[in-house]
Image (spheres, grey):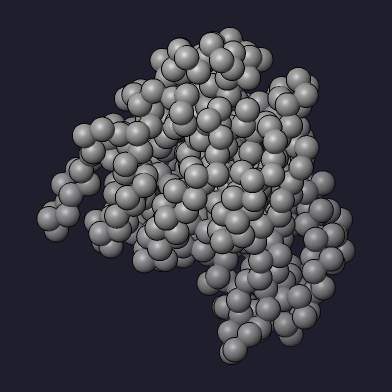
């Protein structure tokens, strides 16, 4: 038996009640993209995306997100428990680990003592140290970086330290080493969720990022569903940046991908050759390439690519397989902000063993981990499990 857990990175479905605390009032990644582009996600909608609480609505321009009469999946709206909106916290909670204290953010750049500590440990000097969009700051500071050889340091409203360098100036392995050193420094009260290496090159008259990005996350501070599965001999296959987020813990095999095209191909191949266990994939383009760049059309096209792939995935799964589709936060490209947004996320659960059902709004992304544990018989029967599993499937595979 296999479970496919697909995270569409940053695919939020509307502002949470506390969104104002994050400056995210009015954020609605899916709704606002649809309002501006009219993108129709036939497969996701047929599963029940538009039937999820709060999604269906009419827009002032006459466009309408309408539910379907007979959704094919069990569906829910998930509210994040962790007081955060970053990738690490979102994925941890999906995996059953709710953080008591969110990772720190640095809305005005890093304090001098942090910059000095990293510079001294890594034996470098930085330029930048700003809250900035990654694509914007390399264009603005790329030439100065080339003249001085100093890597570019920046952050965002997310809990990240990002270090960018032109690989013709700072070789890729040197950039990785700087980030590894920064990760060792950024502990304790400075424990950002991730240190991210952001390599770029000069191509056709402009600075552009490469697909050699690398994330250095903290070790998860508690048990996750990946650890629990591994302890019970149930393999976890990670696709995309999942391995980086969880520092490899509980993961039997990892497939690195540079973009969604590679991620979807790896997912299709996993459906063909992986015999059992959890296949956990992050599809990053929606967030990295389009959400953070406020590229509404690009985001819509990325969603369409995922949507058009789903029939292939469904054809490749077995009768006892289950597919879960969700997200880790929002990143509304229609707002002024280029950062993540504090939003509800969707949950779609489907397969031959699943009853189509409206699960309404659920408190916590960790319902996903509870469901996975219940399906594999390594945890208590979750409320979702009791509601959505077909009795004939449970008798066959419990």
Residue at position x 28%, y 40% in the image: 50
Q: Number of numbered discs present?
A: 0
Residue 103 placement: quadrant: top right
Residue at position x 16%, y 47% in the image: 58
Residue at position x 46%, y 18% in the image: 389
Please say if 108 is above or below 326.
Answer: below
Residue 277 placement: quadrant: top right
**Is 32 or 369 nearer to us in this picture?**
369
Residue at position x 41%, y 15% in the image: 387
Please say if 269 is above or below 366.
Answer: below
Q: Is residue 90 left or right of residue 113?
A: left
Residue 29 visible in the current orientation: yes
Quadrant location of the N terminus in the rendered image? top right
Residue at the bottom extreme, as displayed: 205
**Is 361 or 71 nearer to us in this picture?**
71
Q: Indicate the position of residue 370 as horizontal and vertical percent values.
A: 56, 20
Q: Indicate the position of residue 149 as horizontal and vertical percent values.
A: 78, 78
**Is 258 or 189 nearer to us in this picture?**
258
Q: Indicate the position of residue 44 as horizontal and vertical percent values.
A: 37, 44
Residue 86 visible in the current orientation: no
Please say if 211 is above or below 58.
Answer: below
Q: In this view, does 11 lie to the left or right of 316?
A: left
Quadrant location of the C terminus in the rendered image? top right
Q: Indicate the position of residue 379 as horizontal and vertical percent values.
A: 62, 13
Residue 349 placement: quadrant: top left
């Amino acid at each position: 038996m296999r479970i496919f857990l697909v995270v569409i990175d940053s695919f939020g479905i509307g502002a949470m009640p506390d969104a104002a605390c994050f400056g995210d009032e009015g954020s609605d990644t899916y709704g606002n993209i649809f309002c501006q582009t009219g993108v129709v996600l036939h497969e996701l909608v047929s599963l029940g995306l538009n039937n999820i609480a709060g999604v269906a609505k009419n827009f002032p321009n006459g466009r309408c997100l309408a539910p379907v009469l007979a959704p094919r999946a069990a569906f829910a709206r998930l509210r994040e428990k962790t007081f955060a909106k970053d990738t690490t916290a979102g994925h941890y909670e999906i995996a059953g680990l709710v953080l008591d204290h969110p990772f720190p953010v640095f809305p005005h750049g890093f304090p001098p003592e942090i910059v000095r500590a990293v510079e001294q440990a890594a034996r470098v000097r930085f330029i930048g140290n700003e809250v900035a969009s990654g694509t914007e700051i390399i264009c603005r500071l790329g030439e100065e970086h080339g003249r001085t050889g100093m890597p570019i340091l920046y952050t965002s409203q997310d809990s990240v330290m990002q270090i960018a360098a032109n690989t013709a100036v700072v070789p890729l392995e040197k950039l990785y080493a700087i980030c590894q050193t920064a990760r060792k420094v950024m502990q304790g009260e400075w424990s950002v969720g991730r240190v991210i290496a952001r390599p770029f090159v000069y191509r056709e008259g402009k600075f552009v990022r490469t697909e050699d990005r690398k994330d250095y996350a903290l070790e998860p501070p508690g048990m996750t569903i990946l650890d629990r599965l591994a302890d019970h001999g149930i393999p976890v296959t990670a696709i995309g940046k999942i391995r980086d987020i969880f520092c490899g813990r509980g993961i039997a095999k990892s497939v690195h991908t540079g973009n969604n095209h590679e991620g979807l191909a790896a997912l299709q191949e996993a459906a063909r050759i992986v015999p059992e266990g959890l296949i956990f994939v992050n599809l990053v383009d929606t967030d990295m390439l389009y959400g953070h760049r406020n590229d509404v059309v690009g985001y819509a096209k990325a969603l369409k690519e995922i949507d058009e792939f789903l029939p292939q995935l469904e054809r490749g799964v077995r009768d006892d397989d289950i597919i879960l589709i969700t997200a880790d936060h929002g990143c509304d490209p229609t707002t002024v902000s280029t950062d993540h947004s504090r939003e509800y996320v969707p949950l779609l659960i489907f397969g031959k063993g699943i009853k189509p059902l409206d699960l309404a709004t659920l408190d916590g992304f960790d319902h996903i981990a509870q469901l996975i544990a219940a399906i594999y018989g390594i945890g208590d029967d979750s409320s979702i499990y009791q509601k959505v599993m077909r009795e004939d499937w449970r008798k066959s595979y419990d």
